Image (spheres, helix red, strand yellow):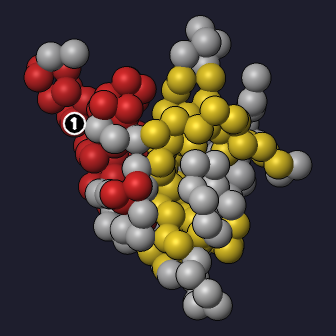
Amino acid sequence: MSLRSRAAGAALALAVPFALAAVPADATPVPDPDPLVWTDLTPTYTATADYQYEPFAVTDGYARAATCDRSGQGGAGYHYVKDAGLGSLDPAEPAGLLYETDADGRRALAGVEWIVRAGGAGTPPTLFGQSFQGPTAVPGVKEPVYTLRAWIWKDNPSGLFAPWNPTVTCP
């Protein structure tokens, strides 16, 4: 893709938080803990917009997991983990990307994930006023970790920061 395409992706990333904030009148949204969270997530949208084209994620150092992660509460999809991002609490540097397979058989970006090594009996970190889940296992990461998922590229009826998305399916 050209530089112009990447610039268009960045412009889209800036517009998405405002578009997602508009909810149809007949919908019953799950309230976010802080209405300003969409503004707080703007750096995340900007940093991950290019990864809607999955090969850019791989080129930038995100390693694909071969299995699709699913539970009785929904799916998380395919984890793509960047080792250099493990431990980051920077909104613009999530260590993980969450993809699902779309109707055309391609990988579609659904969410992002911050991943912090559990390393003992520590207290889970917080980000955006949300406590991380865990300790748990993440495909592609060898040790137990704390995670925080944000479903910024695909709506999640369970909530923006819910650990599982019932609309994410595994093939």
Q: Residue at x 37, y 68 (%)?
A: 88
Quarter placement of the C terminus: top right
In the picture shown, does residue 84 fall above or below 155? below
Callout 1, which amino acid?
Ala
Please provide percent x and percent y for residue 143: 61, 66
Mark 1 falls on what kind of element?
helix
Residue found at x 41% / y 70%: 87
Visible residue check, residue 135: yes
Q: Report x, y in % for residue 91.
A: 34, 62
Is residue 128 or residue 17 the one in the foreground? 128
Horizontal relation, residue 148 to residue 171: left or right: left
Residue farthest right in this picture? 72
Residue identified by numbered label 1: 10
Quadrant occupied by the N terminus:
top left
> Which residue occupies 59% across, 71% down?
146
Q: Nearer the viewer, residue 119 or 31?
A: 119
